[in-house]
Each structure stands twice: as structure tokens, then as C-alpha cells.
Amino acid sequence: MTTYHQATVADADTALRAADACFDEFRSLPPARRAELLEEIALGIEALGEELIETAHRETALPMARLQGERARTCNQARMFAKLILDGTWLDARIDHGDPERQPLPKPDVRLMMQPLGPVVVFGASNFPLAISVAGTDTVSALAAGCPVIVKAHSAHPQTCALVAGAIKAAVAKLGLPAGVFAMFHGSGRDIGMALVKHPLTCAVTFTGSLLGGRAIYDAACARPQPIPFYGEMSSINPVFLLPDALAERAEKIAATFLTSLTMGVGQFCTNPGVIIGVDGPDWRNFLTESSNLVKLWQPATMLHGGICDAYCAGVERFSQLPGVTVLATSAAAPGDAQAAAILFGVSAVDFLARHEFDEEVFGPASVAVTCRDTADLLAVVESLDGQLSASIHGTAGDLLKHARLVRILERKAGRIIFNGYATGIEVCHAMHHGGPYPATTHAYFTSIGSAAIRRFVRPVCYQDFPDDALPAAIQEGNPTRAWRLVDGKMADC
Amino acid sequence: MTTYHQATVADADTALRAADACFDEFRSLPPARRAELLEEIALGIEALGEELIETAHRETALPMARLQGERARTCNQARMFAKLILDGTWLDARIDHGDPERQPLPKPDVRLMMQPLGPVVVFGASNFPLAISVAGTDTVSALAAGCPVIVKAHSAHPQTCALVAGAIKAAVAKLGLPAGVFAMFHGSGRDIGMALVKHPLTCAVTFTGSLLGGRAIYDAACARPQPIPFYGEMSSINPVFLLPDALAERAEKIAATFLTSLTMGVGQFCTNPGVIIGVDGPDWRNFLTESSNLVKLWQPATMLHGGICDAYCAGVERFSQLPGVTVLATSAAAPGDAQAAAILFGVSAVDFLARHEFDEEVFGPASVAVTCRDTADLLAVVESLDGQLSASIHGTAGDLLKHARLVRILERKAGRIIFNGYATGIEVCHAMHHGGPYPATTHAYFTSIGSAAIRRFVRPVCYQDFPDDALPAAIQEGNPTRAWRLVDGKMADC
């Protein structure tokens, strides 16, 4: 087995100094040059070919087809940000023209655009070894913004990380950019991670992982003498609501799609459906029976690593012990080493509401079916939930109109509301939001997936009464970059 | 002297429950109704007439003319947000159309817009008893977004607060809105403030004030079981750079405008110029001589309250004791009770760089003139600075081009860079940014002044595969509100 240099605090310091030293050069490049870097990174990852897929498969146990799909998503993301920064609209440029004649005081000329923050520290996720790891959305959106990136590799897939880091470094070198633009460290202890978070030159931190780990880093980022933004994507149980007319129409079909979502990637998605809620009656019971049958048939599968499997088993055990909880079904086949069986728990709304523990994510193919007596129960359940990345509603158009209150409550709880679908298999696009109130994330304004993810790495800088030729191009009067801008309060691209 | 009910923890709980209970009704109002509320608040404040100005004058010692101007700004701000929300562009609506035929997987229809957070707690500032207090920019931008507001009144101007709160409550009642939309509390201790920050129903907190006070609330907001966004605007010394050609051209004129900015509002502005930096030579010395003469002539004036004056005197004393610091000039007339004398300190760049204490804001009409040996010194001084709300550069167009590096560094330090002007007398507009890296604010992405201030109180909510008639109007296919939206990655208003 290959061993990797375990980074030291001195390594972190060296990398952050190098990142800081090249930040001005990197952010001052024409956007086309940073776009070129992102394109080159995508090509480099593709050029790693089957070695990357096989390595990731060996390290994560994820199926080859899934990893191939994830590689495509990873490269597409890099290309999406390359395209995004060529069109300056993401800079949120704003211009308010001055008026020297205004009474009682002259009106200044005020212009604003986004500027990058500086060196960004990225903690790679374990569950997406490509798309939310070394060259994942955090890294490519930070590079797109003009921020150098230092990745703390996830210790569960070090060789995959090393291969991808090699591709990024080669792209940086090929384009003649300073090496400080990108660095990656291995290190399984807390020391290296905390050293990166606490370093005075670190300007922002991203993280995708557990609530426990995320909260510890959040606390450290907030406790710094100079606090910095920490963007943690942590814990969500992604409730699924089944409304009456849909259940009457297609309970079996919903059971089948629910099982697909529940077991996708062995349940190891931030968007996994951890709780499913319906009102008691023959259709709901039909759904429970169908789902239970499918759970029993589901073959146990290997999880990302032993630690995740242990945590899953502990979570399943914890839920089993809660008052009023029954096991509706579990995989008939016994799980092997580091394998997870699927499990569907049942609980009444009354018992669910009696305890907050059901809001704790169990990462893996487990879900809790909550049986409500009526719509009031269902609304009480949704009111009781913590912040979520997503919530799904299965219903007819009529169901949705009749349950407008459910949607209103979910708008306060979740970052994304899905109709007749599931949160797994997220679309990477401009309107996507992968974020939500705590504990889903640490700041619900920001997303870690989709083109708006770049917002995490910029802040507005306002220029007052500057001569036109001393302004950045995006806010010069003639709009040389042809970006959409808010000019005197109106959108304009001229 | 009127006494006010000192709010209890129970009062805070009652108000937050009422705010939470009416949040859905309030946020679901057509924007025109909330705009009407803001207009009504402006009219109500105007209708308070001279009583308001006289009360504020008595409580703050600020001149009547200044308070009249501040009242106009306060009402204009409310009207600006009323106008803003009638045009849906602030919702940042985004639409990515679906494609059921896409291979290998259908593409979902994904739409996003901003939704308000919920009840917001506002800590009023002492230095703007109208514009950053009870009906200040925090309150009106939160109401515009659809968030109920609970204000913790500043104890230095309780009657002014009570008058304005009365106007807001009357507007709420006149429009038939639930009373929970707005509440205000008096209370001089920490208890009531901390109870508001820690209450589980509070969704965001804003604050304008000292670093010490702001940091304490920030720490409490971050340490909550469910952390919430805290937007603190705290400490900035707003450096002013005088470049050689401008000094050669107009040192005396700059000295005059500098003194006006330094002493405006008895120096009690977040944007007060606390440090002024130039390269040694006859023109710089000429500037120092002229400034010193003007400082001597400046008549001591009464500060907002005794506590602020004590803190000012302590800060002046602290600076006086720092190695290498000389007093270049101070007001010739002796200050009376609660009055501040202006003071100009001098220090070499070498001594300035030797200590971090110069970065600590002294709130009042004091500034430190830093004499650099050369441009390298000047750049070292700017590199050493903490995060700032603003920085100003006085120069010719040629100076600015020759000092491009200065601008590059300031882009990393400050939220606003002003050419040939000062940060005091801020313009309230769309392109304004009143924010900056810590300790200027706690999150540099957000502004507390200008129309973008509304961003602090919203977060994106994404709707996937919703039927058109179940979507909020702003993201329905036909664009009934005619807002600008990002449709499939392109801006469009149709």
C-alpha cells in the first residue's frame, strides 16, 4: 500500500504563504486564462483514464459506472465555471452614476463588483471522491473566482486524491501559472486541518462531511482572532412527503423510486431520504408493504470505508432503541465486512414528535417511515424538523394545491423542494441550491453545488469617483466585457 | 426624565413568538403591501415633525441641521426599499428549464428565488439615532424582505427610539398588519440583548457599534446550538493616502477637506478617517502644518454620551503613550463636559509598523498622520492594516496609475475605495458597499447600507419540477412580475 507524506503544520504554513504570494497575480489574470486552467484540469482528469476510475473504485467501493458518471460531472463542473467567468455577469457589477450638480451635496459616482477573497482551504468529502473532492465544485469554483486553493485530502481515498492533484498541478504548470495556486495535503489527524483553518492567511474554508466534524471546524473558524467564512455542508435527513391522491394513484411506483433513492450509492448521499412521511390509511400501508418488500430484497453493499460503516451500524442501533420504533424491514441477506444492509424503520408521528433524535442523520441506506393520523400530524412533523438541504413532496397537482401550507413550512426549513422526485442525483446548474438552514449548512445564503457556489469566494468592492481607466474592466463606463450590470437601478448589458 | 420599561427575557420571548407567528402572513403579502408599509413608516416619521428632531438633539447633542438631514436619509432609505421590492430583480430569480428527453437522465426543471429568513433582531447604533437605529437601514431592509423585526433600542437615545417605534407601530396598525411584525425594547444591560440573540426563533441579528460589543454578540450567535447569521459592522480606521502629485498640487485644500471629514459629527462616524498616510517631503510637511493649524482652531464639541467621550479620552491617552507618537496638534480651546477636542498625532511608518495598536479605532475626532520615507514604506503600512470599511486615495490621475499596487492591496483590505474624497457622507444607493473584512464587519459579502443590505435577510429556495401554478409568481414561466431573471444562464426580463 502506498503511503503518503503526512503534512505538518510547517507544510501548511509554506503552502499558505505561496498561495498568498501568488494571489494578486492569479486574480489579475484575464478571466480567459483562468477559464483555460479549468478546461485544462478537466482534460487532465479525463487523461488519467481508467487508472483513476479503478483507483477510486478500489478506495471507495463505489461501482465503476457510478465513478465514470461522477468523473463526467466533475469535468462538466470545471467547464461550467470556465464558461461562467467568461461572461462577467457573475461579478454582480453595479453602477450608480454621479451628479456633481445635485443639491445640497454632489452625488458621487459609485461602482461595485465582486473581488476574490484570497487563499481558500477545501476539505474534500469522502462520499464523492471526484465531484466533491480534490477537483470538486469547491476547488473549481474557488479557482474560477481567482482564489488559490489548498485541499486537505480525505484520508479514505488518498491515491485518488493524489492522481487528481497531479492533474491539477500539471495544468497549473502547463499554463505557466505560479505553483502556489494549488496545493494538496494528506493527513489523517486533526492537526493539519486545524492548522489550515487557523492560519492567518486563510481567507475561507469549505467542508462537506459530518455535523460533528463540520461543527468543530466552524467553531475554530469563528473563534479565530480574525474570523473567516466557513462554508460547511453537514447534516440533512431530506424528508419525503407522500400526499393522499398520489398514494392512491401510485403507491407501488413511489415505493420503487423511493428504494432507488434510498439505496443509491449505498445511501451515502447528503441528499439521501432519511425520513418518509404519510397519513395512515390503506394506500400508505400499501406503500409501507411495498417498500418493505423491496428493502428485504436489497442486497447489502460495501460502504466507503470501515468508519462510515461502523457509524451507520451505530446509528441504526440507536434508532432501533428509540421508544415506539419498529423495524418494518431490513435486507434479507446478511451484510458482509464493511457492508450495509438497508433498513426501514416505522414510527408514529406522536413518537417521532416526542424525541429530537430522529433529526440526527444516519448516513447510509436507512430511513424512518412516519405514520401520521391526519394532515395536522403531518404539518406538526414538518414544523418539528431542523434545517434541511432538501425536502420532497409526492402528490398530484391537486394534492399540492391542497397542501400549500406544507410548502410554506418547507420554504422555511429547506434549501430545495422537489415535486414528484428525490433530492439524490442533483442537477449541476445555475438555479440549483445545495444549502439550507443549520445543521444542513452553516450559512443558508450560500450553495456548494451549481454556479452560484462561486459566491462563497468573493466579496463586493466598491469604487467611488475613480477615473474610468483606473477601474476594473467589468465596471468601466463602456462595458468592454459586455456583462449584465445594474446601472442606476436597472439591468443593462450596454 | 422619562423612564422606560426595561425589557425582560419574558418580553423577548413573547415578542419573538408573535414575530414568528405572523411571519408567514407577512412574507406572503404582495410586495406592494410591504412597500406601502415602508412608505407609511416614512410618512409617520416625517409627521413626528420638530418633536423628533428636538428630542434627538437633546439626547445625542447632534446639531439640528444634521438630524434633519439624517431624518431625510432615513425616510429616503425606507422609500428606496419600497421601490426595490416592487421590481422583483432583488429576488435573484433563476430558471433552468428541464428536458425530459435528455440522455442518460432526464433534466429536471429547476427554479430559484430568495425567500426571507424569519424574525430579525436589530441592535440600533448610537451614532445615527435615526438612520441606523429603530427605523434605520437594518429595520427597513428586513421588513422589505418580509422579515418581522425586533429592535433593541440604544440606551443613549431612548425617547428618540420610542417616538420612531411609535410611528412604525402606527403604520403597522393603520395597514391592518399583525402587531408581531415590529417590536422594540429598551434595556441597558446585556441580558435582554443576549436573550434576543440566543432565542431559538431569532433567524438573524444585525449590529452597528464597537468591536468589543459586536464580537460578544457574534460569539453568542456562533455558539448557539443552531448558529444564525450575525451581521456586525464594528471597527474601521478608514486610512487616507495622500499621493505626491496631489500633495504638490493642493496640500492646503486637502488639509481643509480632511479636517471637515475628521470632525464631521464630532468624529463619530464608522467611516471617520483614523489614519492619514503620506511620503515625507516639503508637500507632506506643508499638509501636516496646515492640518495642525486647522485642528488647533477646531472648537471642542459635545459627544453622543458620556461613555463615548470617556472611551475617546482613553483612546487618545493610549495613543499618546505609544512609542514614537507625537501630538502634532490639538484643539486650542479646552473641552467642556462630555466634549471632545480634535487631535492629530504624528508617527513614522517605522514606529507605526512596530505595533498593532494603531489599528484600534479611536471613535471621535482623532487621527494619526503616518510619515513614510518612501513608497515602499507606504505599501508596507497598507499591507499591515486590518480589514476596513473604506480607504481613500488623494492623487492625480497620474498618481493613481503610478500607485496601481496600492489599489491592488486595498482591494484586499477594504469594502470601498474612494478617489479624491472621504468615506464620511456615504451615498445610499445600489452600488454602495458598507462592509469589509474583519474587524470592519463579521461577513464581508454583506453590506449594511445601500439596497444590497436586503441580502442579509434572505436565502435562496430552489423549486424542482413544480407545476407552474404552485410556484411563487417571480419564477412562474410567464414572468408575471416582469423581473430580470437568469434563464438557462442568460439574463432576461420576459
Image (cartoon, coloured by chain):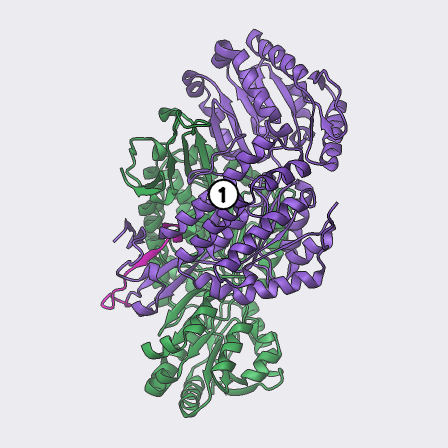
Chain colours: A purple, B green
- Mark 1 — residue? A75
Numbered range of the magenta stretch:
A89-106
Residue B204 in view in this figure: no
Residue count near mark 1 (Cα–Cα under 10 Å), binned few <14, some 14–19, many ≥20: many
Residue at 29 percent across and 59 percent down: it is A480
**Chain ID, mark 1:** A
Q: Is residue B280 left or right of residue A333?
A: left
Amino acid type of the residue tagged 1 in the rendering:
Cys
Tag count: 1
In the rendering, at what x and y percent does residue A459 appear?
46, 56
The quarter in which the C terminus of chain A is drawn is bottom left
The quarter in which the N terminus of chain A is drawn is top right
Residue at 38 percent across and 31 percent down: it is B472
A442 magenta-colored: no
In this orientation, which residue lies closer to the viewer: A124 or A2?
Answer: A2
| A109 w.r.t. A42: above or below | below
In the rendering, at what x and y percent does residue A138 appear?
54, 48
Give residue A331's quadrant in the image.
top right
A93 magenta-colored: yes
| A311 w.r.t. A375: above or below | below
Residue A366 in view in this figure: yes
Give residue A214's quadrant in the image.
top right
Residue at 42 percent across and 85 percent down: it is B291
What secondary structure do most residues of the magenta stretch adopt? loop
| B87 w.r.t. A468: above or below | above
In the rendering, at what x and y percent does residue A488 appear?
28, 55
Q: Is residue A173 left or right of residue A193?
A: left
